[in-house]
Image (cartoon, grey):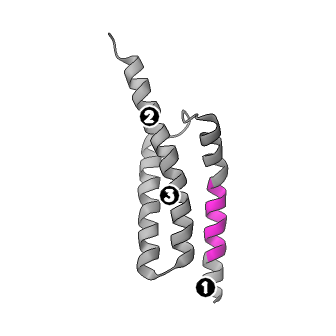
Amino acid sequence: METELIGGLAATLTTASFLPQAARVIRTNDTAAISLWMYLLFTFGVALWGAYGLLIGSRPVVVANAVTLTLALVILVQKIRHVRAARTKSRPR
């Protein structure tokens, strides 16, 4: 029981720490200061943590990573759109 409690607390804190960044990007639609490669790696890593949580049957790991993955994907999609838009603008006509 203590193990799950510690896991739940850790999952809550790490997911909560991500929320201000996600909220800011969603609110402002500004991803200029975010590294595309970092977010690609981060999102893939979060997906793998979620898979790991499923494999070991840990609800805190699964739930926390599902929430974080959802938010990370929203930000990643916005970042990719912004990168593509910037590339389109910078192409000579």
Residue plotted at (41% across, 57% down): 44
Under mark 3, the amino acid is Leu
The first of marks 2 and 1 along the sequence is: 1
In the depicted structure, whether residue 15 falls above or below residue 82: below
Give the percent coordinates (x, y) of residue 59: 54, 77
Q: CA distance from mark 1 to mark 3?
A: 23 Å
Q: Which residues are magenta?
A: 8-18
Residue positioned 66% across, 57% down in the render: 17
Q: Name the residue that disc number 1 marks.
A: 3
Q: Closer to the camera: disc 1 or disc 3? A: 3
Circle 3 crowding by C-alpha within 10 Å: few under 14, some 14–19, many from 20: many
Residue under the point 46% across and 47% down = 38
Task: Quarter of the image for the N terminus: give it.
Answer: bottom right
**Residue 55, position as x, y percentages in the image:** 41, 78
What amino acid is labelled 2 in the image? Arg
Q: Position of residue 12 (x, y in %)?
A: 65, 67
Along the polypeptide, which appears first: circle 2 or circle 3?
3
Q: Which mark is residue 81?
A: 2
- Local secondary structure at mark 3: helix
| Residue 14 within the segment the image draws in magenta | yes
Question: Magenta part mainly helix, strand or loop?
Answer: helix
* Residue 84 drawn above or below residue 48: above
Single out the mark in the foreground, 2 or 1. 2
| 33 in relation to 38, above or below | above
